[in-house]
Image (spheres, rainbow, N blue to C red):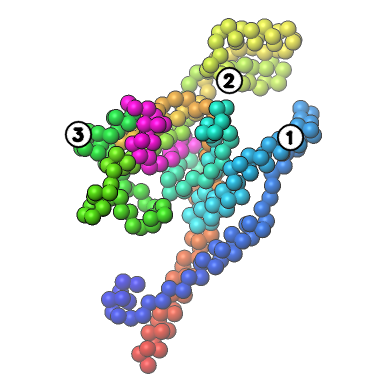
Amino acid sequence: IAKLIYERRPVLTINQIRPLVNLAAGYHINNRTVDRYLPGNDGTGTAEMAHVLTQVSRHIDQMSHVPWVDLQVFMDGIQTGRGYYDTQLDFTKNLFGDVKIVSCDPFSVFLDPDGCEQDLNEGAFAHVVRWMSCDQIRLLYGHRAADRVSSLQAGSYSSGGDGFNDDVSPARGFGGEENWLYRGSAYSNWIDTGQRTYRVVAAQHWVTTERWFFVSLETGDFKPVPDSWSAERIERTMMFMDQERSAFVLQKKVARRLRWTHQIADTIVYDQWSPYEKMTLTPFFPYFRRGTTRGMIHDLISPQEEVNVRRSAQQNQVMRA
């Protein structure tokens, strides 16, 4: 394109990919399915409980606007090859937490480069990058973390990481490519320096550690002992199991455990065990083969370029005649 513009020759860009993407999105919307729970084959579940779980799942979908989230994840998948759901408890409206399902920006999720399984829990880690203001950091991580990272603005703090703008991603936000917050001149008087954003890297990574487990001698199943349980509560639980004639033992074993570590520059602002047994990210890969992901657009780029070159050449010949 740059060469044709330099030679003052016509350049045509006839977008044939967008109608195909819109068509695939339309098929996705018209063929949307609804989750339905069924009782298990081992006899432990009932039809009534399955019906209750189905209604609870539909309520969660309605509260989280899952049809719109599904479309976002689907569009991310067919365009970039990777889409992500993020399912966590939201405590903004309920002290006990509401299940909330959102879509993650695929350009802000960095997976384990050595991973090759579709289940992200088979890998070592997954990083999610977010941009937060100083006020948001103070609200989420406390005053000490906010005071620690606020010194990055004045330059009085030497950070070990300098890659704040090295993400290879398109323009995001309603401002598009016009990121006026980082301009000077006439906008400088309208900028609150305390609202500048910082790059927060939220890591979900697996750590090998020792834990206590309740082990069933009848089925072989085992469940970890919650960290909040005291020794007295564990002893009462074991006594209750003995009274019910359930063969349970307490065993300490080495296992993988998920840990959350949030970092801003070289400052760790949060480092605790995850409240969930698995990663909160659920991936959607339209094409997956041993860690290789592709989307719908990948195979349409070359035909699109051929159409653009051919149409531009035809127009150039017509104008020369």
- SS at badge 2: strand
Residue of label 3: 156
Q: Which numbered mark, 2 or 1, is in the foreground of this view? A: 1
Amino acid type for the residue under numbered disc 1: Val
Q: CA distance from mark 2 to mark 1?
A: 27 Å
Q: Is residue 229 above or below residue 133?
A: above
Residue 134 showing in the rendered view: yes
- Classify mark 2: residues with Cα within 10 Å, few (<14), some (14-19) or many (20+): some
Amino acid type for the residue under numbered disc 3: Ser
Please state the horizontal and vertical placement of residue 45, each as a whole percent of the image. Answer: 76, 30
Q: Residue furthest front?
A: 189
Q: Is residue 321 above or below residue 96?
A: below
Please state the horizontal and vertical placement of residue 227, each as a whole percent of the image. Answer: 52, 17
| Magenta stretch contains residue 132 | yes
Residue of label 2: 224
Residue 40 showing in the rendered view: no
Q: Residue at x 52, y 46 (%)?
A: 103
Mark 3 or mark 2, earlier in chain: 3
- Classify mark 3: residues with Cα within 10 Å, few (<14), some (14-19) or many (20+): few
Q: Which residues are magenta?
A: 122-144
Q: Is residue 291 above or below residue 10?
A: above
Please tell me which residue lies in front, 291 or 82: 82
Q: Which mark is residue 52?
A: 1
- SS at badge 3: loop
Quadrant where the N terminus lies? bottom left
Please tell me which residue lies in front, 69 or 282: 69
Amino acid type for the residue under numbered disc 2: Pro
- SS at badge 1: helix
